[in-house]
Image: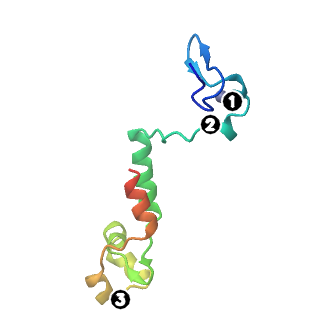
Amino acid sequence: MKCINCHKREAQKHERFGILPCKECQNKPYRNARKLPEFTTAEIKQERKEYAEDIEQPFRKGEPNKRYIEIYGKERAKEVGMSDYEIEHAKYVYSADDEYYDRNL
Ligand SMILES: [Zn+2]
């Protein structure tokens, strides 16, 4: 069996870990290893959601953020500069970061 990384040299067999990349690839794993999909547990997802709420901004590109009002309340929204009109008409505003975030949940 060939090395899963370089497909040139013979893979190494390990009694506990099974098939490993060849010795040469193992010696420089960060340069040669393929990028594997991120392994995400439910617990990490939950932490990310909580973190997302922590960083919710009152305005995105000048638009009042409805989600901010839902999380922190109208009083806090007024404190950060939203008018009554803006609070009534706030929408869910999304940045490019949010789209990236949602795709990776
Ligand atoms: Zn290799």
The reply to whether dot 3 and dot 1 touch (C-beta < 8 Å) is no
From mark 3 to mark 2, how far is it between C-alphas? 53 Å
Q: Nearer the viewer, mark 3 or mark 2?
A: 2
The disc labelled 2 sits on which kind of residue? Ala
* Category of crowding for the residue at label 1, using alpha-carbon neighbours closer than 10 angstroms: few (below 14), some (14–19), many (at least 20): some
In the picture provided, is 49 more to the left or to the right than 91? right
The disc labelled 1 sits on which kind of residue? Cys
Image quadrant in which you'd find residue 29? top right
Which labelled disc corresponds to residue 83?
A: 3
In the picture provided, is 10 more to the left or to the right than 72? right
**Would you say the beta carbon of the disc 2 residue lies within 8 angstroms of ligand 1?**
no
* Image x and y of residue 68, in percent: 37, 71
How was the colour assigned to the protein in this rendering? rainbow
Q: Which residue is mark 1?
A: 25
Q: Residue at x 62, y 36 (%)?
A: 33
From mark 3 to mark 1, how far is it between C-alphas? 60 Å
Above or below for 61 versus 26: below
Q: Nearer the viewer, mark 3 or mark 1?
A: 1
Which labelled disc corresponds to residue 33?
A: 2
The disc labelled 3 sits on which kind of residue? Ser
View quadrant of ligand 1? top right
Q: Residue at x 39, y 76 (%)?
A: 76
**Would you say the beta carbon of the disc 1 residue lies within 8 angstroms of ligand 1?**
yes
* Image x and y of residue 55, in percent: 47, 64
**Would you say the beta carbon of the disc 3 residue lies within 8 angstroms of ligand 1?**
no
The reply to whether dot 3 and dot 2 touch (C-beta < 8 Å) is no
Image quadrant holding the N terminus, namely top right
